[in-house]
Image: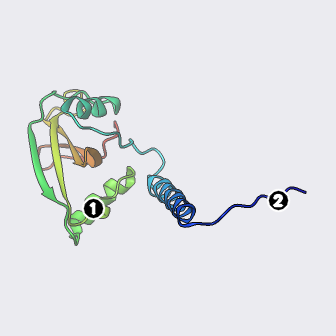
Amino acid sequence: MFVLTFKWNKKIALLVVIAAALVLCAIILAIAGGDRAEGTPGTPKVKTNEERVMFLNKLGWAVDETPISKNTVVIPKEFSDVYETYNQLQLDQGYDLSKYSGLEAIIYTYTVTNYTGYTGNVVADLYVMNYEVIGGDIHSLAIDGFMHGLGKK
């Protein structure tokens, strides 16, 4: 029979506590990272304009490389009916703006150049926070236009 013994001291106790904390953090990150719906466009880091354009390109959209606007918005703490409807669009594509209630995001708007079946102006909005896409849509600029998720229709 083999018996292993060791002397328990403050240094070993500290190492055990640190190791347990690291394991707990890894578990929390794994759980938090897995709450996206199936078929989500993904949330790669989009630190540069080129990365945002590439993100839209990967979804099938050709866009002008220079955004037509960049606006900072605060996601409302309490959603109105209109915002609830918009967030349902986000939920349908795997995003959830309610997780960011009360926080600032940047909306980058790009002109879409390859939208088929519609002759008016179409844009892509990307909601970005901490260089991560947290939502977005494709919509026409007409009053009686349309809006849908970032996926190609």
Verify CB contact (< 8 Å) between mark 1 and mark 2: no
Mark 1 nearby-residue class (10 Å; few <14, some 14–19, many ≥20)? some
153 shown above or below 78: above
Image coords of residue 128 (percent x, y) = 23, 47
Residue placed under numbered mark 2 in the picture? 3
Mark 2 nearby-residue class (10 Å; few <14, some 14–19, many ≥20)? few
Sequence-wise, which precedes: disc 1 or disc 2?
2
Amino acid type shown at disc 2: Val
- Alpha carbon of mark 1 to alpha carbon of mark 2: how far? 53 Å
Residue placed under numbered mark 1 in the picture? 100
Q: Nearer the viewer, mark 1 or mark 2?
A: 2
Image coords of residue 53 (percent x, y) = 23, 31
The N terminus lies in quadrant: bottom right
Query: At x 8% / y 41%, what residue is drawn?
Result: 69
Which residue lies most toward the bottom here? 78
Amino acid type shown at disc 1: Tyr
Residue 148, visible in the rendered structure:
no
Image coords of residue 46 (percent x, y) = 27, 38
> Helix, strand, or loop for circle 2?
loop
Residue 145, visible in the rendered structure:
yes
Residue 66, quarter of the rendered image: top left
Query: At x 41% / y 45%, what residue is drawn?
Result: 40
> Helix, strand, or loop for circle 1?
helix
Instruction: Pick whichever, 74 or 109, lies toward us.
Output: 74
User: Would residue 23 be found to the left or right of residue 99 on screen?
Assistant: right
